Image: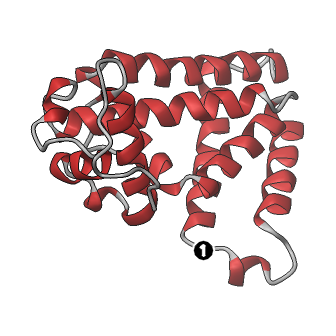
Amino acid sequence: MSTRKPEQSYHHGELRSALVLAATELLVEGGLASISLREVARRAGVSHNAPYRHFADRDSLLAALATQGFIQLEQAMDQQPGGLAELGQCYVRFALAQPGHFALMFSVSLDKRRYPELQQAAAALHARLVAVVQVAAPQRPHQVATLAAWSLVHGLAHLLQEQQLGETLGPGLSAEQLAEQVTQLFARLL
């Protein structure tokens, strides 16, 4: 729950970040369906028209949130040195810790072509993956190897989020342990 007081006002330069923060809180608390410009404005303690100074519509705000997600994932990867397996483990950890952001980042309902900042953030993450794959498997076609690596961790993250692996693997392995074992195996086989 937000600790901001409703009467608190935001001045030029602070409004956009206050709106994104309010939308992030709503995303965590209630998912995408809970985010409206009116509710974000209420949560940020500003008039219901204030969000339109920075966001043309709800999708523009969602694009800012998705961009924030890509940047946060990139920052998490910066703090997790290592190779392909470690990068994959970081990806899975982020997906499990930030399910709302993760779902939004890869949502088909958000047209990345409309939002250059979102395109750049997504492209930066993809470029990072390509570079790590090229180091891990220089003999493999980089486009196919990159797609294989991304598909593996994205699929694993989704299966873990949806709790689809409990019966398959039985008790005893945490999500972290599973991600480590799967990514290590993949990196060795690649």
Left or right of residue 179: residue 56: left
Q: Can residue 187 be seen in this view?
A: yes
Left or right of residue 87: residue 72: left
Q: Is residue 106 visible?
A: no
Q: Where is residue 163, by image quadrant?
A: bottom right
Residue 50 drawn above or below residue 129: below
Residue 63 drawn above or below residue 178: above
The kind of residue tagged 1 is Gln
Residue 134 drawn above or below residue 18: above
Q: Which residue is drawn at 46% across and 58% down?
A: 28
Q: Where is residue 136, by image quadrant?
A: top right
Pick the front one: 36 or 151: 36
Residue to which mark 1 is pinned: 163
Q: Which residue is drawn at 81% across and 61% down?
A: 178
Q: Where is residue 185 in the image (x, y as percent from the top left)?
A: 86, 48
Q: Where is residue 23 in the image (x, y as percent from the top left)?
A: 35, 46
Q: Position of residue 70 (x, y in %)?
A: 52, 31
Q: Which residue is drawn at 81% across and 69% down?
A: 174
